[in-house]
Amino acid sequence: MGAKNPYLAVLLAQIIYAGMILLSKAVFNEGMKSYVFIFYRQLVGTIILVPLAMIFERKNSVPLSFLIFCKIFMLAFLGITLALNVYAFALVYTSATMAAAIVNSLPVSTFFFAVLLRMERVTIRTMPGVAKVAGLIACMAGVAILAFYKGPQLKFLLHHPFIECNSSKNHDSSGKKRLLGSLLLFISILFWGLWLVLQAQFLKSYPSKLTFTSLQCLASAVQTFVVAISLERNPNHWKLGWNLRLLAVLYCGILVAAVSYYLQTWVIEKKGPIFQAMSTPLSLIITIIGSVFLLGEAISLGSVLGGILLVVSLYSVLWGKSKEQGTDNQGSISVQPEKECIEKKDAEMNTTEPAIVV
């Protein structure tokens, strides 16, 4: 059973992410402001993570200087406050399926920024390098199809929404809104990709992961509150009550900000980042099923074709990356026996030759 645990953890994490997209889309269709929702989500995440950081890393955490806090504050603004607000605003004008499809370009955009910052290399003369470049091109093509091509709608036998909401209010009401929403989704993914690369660099000097995550969540809660209170002063839009809005906030704050982040970290530790990234298309499949049978959304041919291209781009980049890692490991292994032979010969010479005393 132990060998199956990473697979179960990956599946659970992708189910959580799909549920986040579906619930967020549902409450936005009901009229909840996206920036208010983001603030409540980060507030709940802060309430969960800060006590955990104080309990588990109180003695082992790296001292927090003013410069480190400023860096964490800016990282939170880039990867959480800015990215989440752009993503949520785009989700109002697009479908849950399109949002889940574009998320598949996150590993590709992360790789793109890693190349720009010279954390990754691309050699076009080799097959892995060609696969990486082809993945980037396929990613751009997939986003273009999602943005500019709608196509006919795919019909399903069961098309009655389980969650009653005004799904037709904003979804694909015009070509301009579809284009704006898809481009904003891709921009938010670019923000996330850059955030992941900068975060990896920062964690080399500040390895207290739980403290770092909780401080980012706290900083983003303050930032998103400033954004929300600046854009929305009506008290009625801040009320939650015992309804779908409260469920969505608690779901995203607890399961996404706490459980799924921990599952991802655990899976990466056990199986590596490539294994985690390869599970991303599962969220798209689950979201397509949920958007049809829960939200009653219509799936267009353009969304399916664009999603397929994004999945192809993801696996193309991951294949190139895994092949390069394999050749690097083979190179390091082939050097080791030669080194051991030299050390063995030196040891034999030392035992057979008399020692020279000076």
Image (cartoon, rainbow, N blue to C red):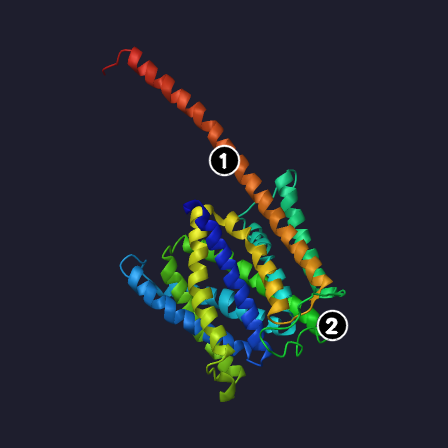
Instruction: Find disc 1 in the rendering and name its residue.
Output: 329
Looking at the image, can residue 233 be seen?
no
Give the camera-side residue of 237 and 193. Answer: 237
Give the camera-side residue of 19 and 351. Answer: 19
Q: Earlier in the sequence, mark 1 or mark 2?
A: 2
Give the camera-side residue of 183 and 43. Answer: 43
For the residues bearing labels 1 and 2, Cβ distance under 8 angstroms: no
Q: Amino acid at mark 1?
A: Asn
Q: Residues within 10 Å of mark 1 (few under 14, many from 20)?
A: few
Horizontal relation, residue 266 to residue 167: left or right = left
Q: Residue furthest left?
A: 357
Residue at the location (69% across, 62% down)?
303
Residue 50, percent across and down?
A: 35, 67
Residue 8, percent across and down?
A: 47, 53
Residue 103, percent across and down?
A: 59, 60
Q: Amino acid at mark 2?
A: Gly
- Residues under labels 1 and 2: Cα distance? 49 Å
Q: Residues within 10 Å of mark 2 (few under 14, many from 20)?
A: few
Number of numbered tags placed on the structure image: 2
Above or below residue 63? Residue 129 is: above
Regarding mark 2 in the picture, which secondary structure is present there? Answer: helix
Residue at the location (61% across, 48% down)?
315
Instruction: Find disc 2 in the rendering and name its residue.
Output: 175
Give the camera-side residue of 225 and 155. Answer: 155
Residue 64, percent across and down?
A: 33, 62
For residue 145, which quarter of the picture? bottom right
Looking at the image, can residue 214 be seen?
yes
Above or below residue 340? Residue 301 is: below
Regarding mark 1 in the picture, which secondary structure is present there? Answer: helix
Residue at the location (26% across, 59% down)?
59
Quadrant for the C terminus in the image: top left
Horizontal relation, residue 115 to residue 241: left or right = right
